[in-house]
Amino acid sequence: MTLKSTPAGGALVLTIDRPPVNALDLPTIETLRKTFATVAANPPKDGVVLTGAGERAFCAGADMKNSGNKSGLEYWAAARTGGLQPATLNAANEVAVQAFLDRQLNFIGIATVIEAVITKSTGRINSTIGNSILTPALATIASARRRRRMRRASA
């Protein structure tokens, strides 16, 4: 067993048990994901403690011995829903918002930067992220631009 679940009073203790250093392989990551989804549906009143078995490490990270010669980034992308797209979107968002806060970019430019990054990373805007998040945002921005042009034209 790679993950042990033990009630402890009003809490739940989850113990990663993959000797010698509790490295995470894809099946263990999936077990963690499913366990956390189950716990989220009915959380223990005193919380959840995540720990590692043994004396050497809480968790060494990815089990690269079974990675099939993938890089660390490719390994974690395989374990995530959406692959690298959520991480790419998050990084693009952080950079764009920081540029906005530093007054190097206007508010509308945030979505433009995110669109450019997603297009570059996927080769298309027709991604799940693009359709669910970016496309409505860009439509709102386009609408705001049209209204602004109409106000300027009527002034």
Image (tube, helix red, strand yellow):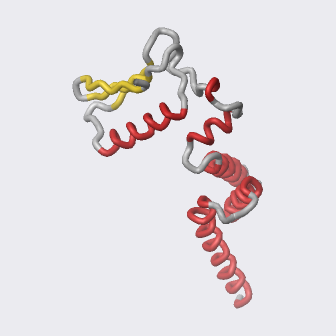
Up-down: is 140 above or below 146? above
* Residue at the farthest left position: 9
Number of numbered discs visible in the structure rendering: 0
Q: Residue at x 53, y 27 (%)?
A: 24
Q: Nearer the viewer, residue 39 or 68?
A: 68
Horizontally, is 23 left or right of 130 in the view? left
Q: Position of residue 29 (x, y in %)?
A: 50, 34
Horizontally, is 118 left or right of 22 in the view? right
- Res. 92 visible in picture: yes
- Res. 101 visible in picture: no
Q: Position of residue 16 (x, y in %)?
A: 44, 23
Q: Quadrant of the N terminus?
A: top left
Up-down: is 34 above or below 93? above
Q: Quadrant of the C terminus?
A: bottom right
Up-down: is 136 above or below 114? below
Q: Residue at x 70, y 90 (%)?
A: 154
Q: Quadrant of residue 5?
A: top left
Q: Residue at x 64, y 36 (%)?
A: 75
Up-down: is 143 above or below 47? below
Q: Residue at x 57, y 25 (%)?
A: 61
Q: Nearer the viewer, residue 21 or 94?
A: 21
* Residue at the farthest bottom position: 154
* Residue at the farthest top position: 55
Q: Nearer the viewer, residue 139 or 72?
A: 72
Q: Position of residue 94 (x, y in %)?
A: 65, 47
